[in-house]
C-alpha cells in the first residue's frame, strides 16, 4: 500500500490550497476553493434536513473528493450527459446521493435544478433517495443495494477496454475514458463487490479508479463491531494498485497525487483508501449519528456558521462559487466538440467501423438479424434446449459484434462458447467471450455495467437454480431497462439427480 504523505503534490494547479478546516477562524477571508468545499457541505446538510430523511454524513466527508473530480479530473459535458467520450462516474455508496445531485446541479446539468434538490427523496423527484439511471442525466447506473455500483464499474471498465481494442486506430483513440468510483465500508462488506473486484484484478483494468470513503462508520456504529480486516491488503491480493490518503477531509493535494499515480499505473485497477471523518463539521462528526439521519436544525445552523455561511439562510450557493463551477458547461462542450471532430476524421478514414460504432451506441440491431436465426421443423430430432440456445447465440454473434458475455464457469453445460471470437482477457481485450469464474452475482452486476457503458449487449449464463445468487443484479437490470440477456439452463426436473440443494 502506497501511503501518500500530506506534503506530496504532483502537477499542482495554481489554486491548490488546503480546504477550510472545521475549526478554522472565520475572520480570514475564505478562498474560492474553501468556499466551494464549504458550499458542498452546507448544501448536503440542507438537502437532507429539508427532506427530513437521508444521509448527510458521507456527502460532507467526501466533499473534497467530489470537488476534485468534477472540478479538475473528469471529462464530461453537462449539456450532453450521454456524450460517448466522457469519463464514467459511479456512486457505489448510493445512499450518499445528495452529494452526486449537488455536483450535477453545481456543474450545470439541466436535470438537477435547485428546485430538484429541494424535492430530494420526494415523489416524482429527479433526486430520488438512491441514484436511478433513467431519471437524471449524469447518473450512469442505479445504485441502491450496496456493492452493485462498484461491480457495475468493473463492467464499464471492461466495456471501455473492449471497445478501445476493437475500434481504436493509430491517432484515433475514440474510446479512451476512465471509470471513477466512490465506494464505502458497506460496499466493501458485500460479497458481490469481492466477486467483481477479484475479476477486475485478474483482468488488469488499468482505467478503473476507485476512491474508498474509509470513515469507519456503518449504521450500527463503528466498523470495529464487525469489520476489522485490512481492506488495502485484500485489494493488493486481488492484484490491484493500492494507495492511501491519510486526510481526505482536508488534503486535496494528496488526493490529486493519488489519482495521478493511479492513472500512471496502466496494468492494474487502482484502489485509493481515503481516510475521512463522516459528517465533517457536524457536532456529531465521526459517529453513526450522522450516517442516515438529518443533522437537526441546530446542528445545521452551527455547521453553516463554522464554514462561514449565514445560519438563517438555506440552499445558498455563493455567486462566485456557482460561476466557477458553471465554467464546466462550456469546457465540457469544447471537449465534446474536439471528440466529435476526431470521430468525423475517423469516419472519413474508416467509414464502415464508424457506421458500426454509431449503430451500436444507438442501440440498433443490424439489418436482417432475425433472418440469421436457425430454423427448425416439427418432427425433427429432439435436441436439448441449451444446445439450441447455443446455436442461436452463435448465429447472432456472427452478425452482432455487440454481443459480448460468458458463463459463471459453466461454459460446456450452458453451451455459451462463441466460435467466432476469442476469450476476453488482459492480453486479448478485443475478445468477446468472458470467463466470469464461479461468481454469479458479480457476473450479473458486471453485465449491467457493460450494458450501461453503451454499445454492448451482454449475456450472462449459469444454471437456473443459481439465479438466486444474482437476484439483486437481475432486479436492477429490469428496473434500469438494461438490454441484458440472462441465460439460465438446466431448468428441467432432470436436474433432481444432483440432489435437492
Image (cartoon, rainbow, N blue to C red):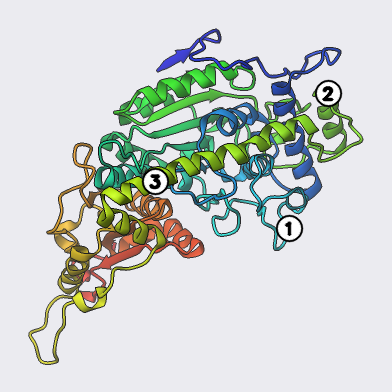
- Residue 266 tag number: none
Q: CA distance from mark 3 to mark 1?
A: 30 Å
Say which residue label 3 marks: 156
Label 3, residues with CA under 10 Å away: few <14, some 14-19, many ≥20? many
Q: Are marks 1 and 2 in contact (CB under 8 Å)?
A: no
Q: Which residue occupies 53% across, 35% down?
A: 184
Tell me if I can see residue 290 in this picture.
yes
Camera-nearest residue between 433 and 147: 433
User: Quarter-wise, where is residue 47 in the image?
Assistant: top right
CB within 8 Å, label 2 to label 3 = no
User: Which marked residue is nearer to the observer: mark 3 or mark 1?
Assistant: 3
Label 1 sits on residue: 122
Q: Is residue 464 visible?
A: no
Tell which tag, 1 or 2, sits nearer the viewer: 2
Q: Is residue 306 above or below residue 98?
A: above
Observer-nearest residue: 202 or 35? 35
Give the residue at the far top of this rendering: 7
Amino acid at each position: 500500500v502506497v501511503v501518500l504523505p500530506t506534503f506530496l503534490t504532483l502537477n499542482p494547479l495554481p489554486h491548490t490550497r488546503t480546504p477550510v478546516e472545521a475549526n478554522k477562524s472565520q475572520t480570514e477571508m475564505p478562498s474560492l476553493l474553501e468556499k466551494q468545499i464549504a458550499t458542498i457541505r452546507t448544501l448536503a446538510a440542507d438537502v437532507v434536513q429539508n427532506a427530513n430523511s437521508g444521509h448527510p454524513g458521507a456527502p460532507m466527508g467526501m466533499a473534497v473528493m467530489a470537488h476534485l473530480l468534477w472540478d479538475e479530473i473528469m471529462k464530461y459535458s453537462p449539456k450532453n450527459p450521454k456524450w460517448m467520450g466522457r469519463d464514467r462516474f459511479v456512486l457505489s455508496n448510493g445512499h450518499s446521493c445528495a452529494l452526486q445531485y449537488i455536483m450535477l446541479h453545481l456543474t450545470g446539468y439541466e436535470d438537477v435544478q435547485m428546485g430538484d434538490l429541494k424535492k430530494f427523496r420526494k415523489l416524482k423527484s429527479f433526486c430520488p433517495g438512491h441514484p436511478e439511471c433513467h431519471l437524471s442525466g449524469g447518473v450512469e447506473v442505479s445504485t441502491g443495494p450496496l456493492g452493485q455500483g462498484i461491480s457495475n464499474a468493473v463492467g464499464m471498465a471492461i466495456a471501455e477496454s473492449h471497445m478501445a481494442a476493437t475500434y481504436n486506430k493509430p491517432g484515433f483513440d475514440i474510446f479512451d475514458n476512465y471509470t471513477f468510483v466512490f465506494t464505502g465500508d458497506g460496499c466493501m462488506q458485500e460479497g458481490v463487490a469481492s466477486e467483481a473486484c477479484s475479476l477486475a484484478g485478474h483482468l488488469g483494468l488499468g482505467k478503473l479508479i476507485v476512491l474508498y470513503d474509509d470513515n469507519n462508520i456503518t449504521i450500527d456504529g463503528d466498523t470495529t463491531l464487525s469489520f476489522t480486516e485490512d481492506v488495502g491488503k485484500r485489494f493488493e491480493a486481488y492484484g490491484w494498485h493500492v494507495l492511501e490518503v491519510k486526510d481526505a477531509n482536508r488534503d486535496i493535494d494528496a488526493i490529486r497525487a493519488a489519482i495521478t499515480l493511479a492513472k500512471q499505473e496502466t496494468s492494474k485497477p487502482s484502489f485509493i483508501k481515503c481516510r475521512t471523518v463522516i459528517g465533517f463539521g457536524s457536532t456529531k462528526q465521526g459517529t453513526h449519528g450522522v450516517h442516515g439521519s438529518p443533522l437537526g436544525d441546530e446542528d445545521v445552523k452551527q455547521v453553516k456558521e463554522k464554514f462561514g455561511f449565514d445560519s438563517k439562510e438555506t440552499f445558498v450557493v455563493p455567486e462566485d462559487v456557482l460561476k466557477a463551477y458553471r465554467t464546466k458547461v462550456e469546457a465540457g462542450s469544447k471537449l465534446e466538440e474536439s471528440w466529435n471532430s476526431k470521430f468525423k476524421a475517423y469516419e472519413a478514414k474508416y467509414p464502415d467501423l464508424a457506421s458500426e460504432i454509431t449503430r451500436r451506441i444507438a442501440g440498433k440491431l443490424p439489418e436482417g438479424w432475425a433472418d440469421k436465426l436457425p430454423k427448425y421443423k416439427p418432427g425433427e430430432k429432439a435436441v436439448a434446449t441449451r444446445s439450441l440456445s447455443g446455436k442461436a447465440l452463435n448465429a447472432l454473434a456472427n452478425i452482432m459484434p455487440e454481443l459480448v458475455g460468458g458463463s459463471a464457469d459453466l461454459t460446456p453445460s450452458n453451451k455459451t462458447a462463441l466460435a467466432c471470437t476469442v476469450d476476453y482477457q488482459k492480453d486479448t481485450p478485443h475478445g468477446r467471450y468472458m470467463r466470469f469464474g464461479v461468481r454469479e452475482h458479480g457476473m450479473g452486476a458486471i453485465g449491467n455495467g457493460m450494458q450501461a457503458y453503451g454499445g454492448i449487449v451482454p449475456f450472462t449464463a449459469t444454471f437456473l437454480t443459481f439465479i438466486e445468487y444474482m437476484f439483486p443484479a437481475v432486479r436492477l437490470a429490469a428496473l434500469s431497462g438494461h438490454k441484458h440477456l440472462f441465460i439460465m439452463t438446466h431448468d428441467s426436473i432432470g436436474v433432481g439427480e444432483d440432489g435437492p440443494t
